[in-house]
Every structure is written in C-alpha cells, then in structure tokens.
Image (spheres, grey):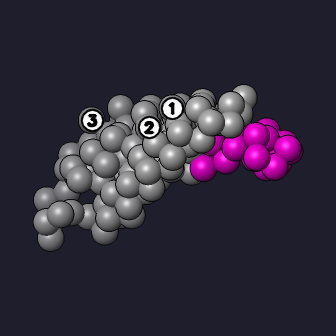
Amino acid sequence: MSDSNPPGALPLVFAAGLAGAAGVALSAAETHTGGAFTGTAATMLLIHAPALLAIGLVGRNVLLLLAGLVLVVGLVLFCGDLLARDFLGHRLFPFAAPTGGTLLIIGWLVAAGSAFVRPRS
C-alpha cells in the first residue's frame, strides 16, 4: 500500500484477509460438521472479503472507507450470530443477524453513493 492511502485503509485490508481466511476455514468446517448456518456465514465472508480488500486498497474518499467499516460491522453481527447458533446453540443477541444484514445492505448503498464524492487530493 502506498503512503497516499487514507489511514482507515489498512484495517480494511486486514479485515479482508481475516474474512477470506475465515470463509475458507468455515467452508471446510461446514463440509465436515454440516452446521445449518455455517455455510451461509462462509459464503458471506468469502463474498465480502474481496470487496473489503478493494475498498482498503483504492478507498479514495471518506464515504467509501465508511462503507467498508459498515460492511465489517455487518459481517461480524450477521456471521457471528449464525455461527453462534451452530457452535454455541444460541444467538449473539436478539436481532443480531437482521441488524448485521441491514448494515451489509447499508454498507453497499454507502459504497454506491461514494461514487459521487470527490476523492481526497
């Protein structure tokens, strides 16, 4: 990453790596354990990992970086709740998955809106 990247970019690249690794590991776990929600969590992590990586590497405005942050929080809540159900037998807290899913949708909409914001100079 170059010195011109905004300060919030590096944590998003880190989160992308964690999401990708977790997605692959959970895909393998789902194959062997057959958890009802593990496969869905793995898929969501694997879908969002490249998006977070791209945002972290080319995030040229604050709105796009905010979108990345919202996506990370959404993934943690959505996937965390699904995985808690499979591995712990209970939810993280009431409405954790719907809240996470809503944040994922909002994150994508914020990313779309960032197209209309000038990049930092």
Residue 11 falls inside the magenta stretch: no
Q: Secondary structure at mark 2?
A: helix
* Among the two numbered marks 3 and 2 on one chain, the one whose residue lies closer to the N terminus: 2
Mark 3 Cα-neighbour bin, 10 Å: few <14, some 14–19, many ≥20: few
* Residue sitting nearer the eye, 119 or 83: 83
Residue at figure coordinates x 31%, y 49% from the top left: 53
Circle 2 residue: 46
- Marks 3/2 in contact by CB < 8 Å: the verdict is no
Q: Which residues are magenta?
A: 76-97
Q: Tell whether 86 sits left or right of 23.
A: right
Q: Tell whether 66 sits left or right of 75.
A: left
Given the image, on which type of amino acid does mark 2 rest?
Answer: Leu
Circle 3 residue: 115
Given the image, on which type of amino acid does mark 1 rest?
Answer: Thr
* Marks 2 and 1, how far apart at CA: 5 Å
Q: Give the percent coordinates (x, y) of residue 88.
A: 81, 49
Which of the image's four quarters has the N terminus? bottom left
Circle 1 residue: 43
Q: Which mark is residue 89?
A: none
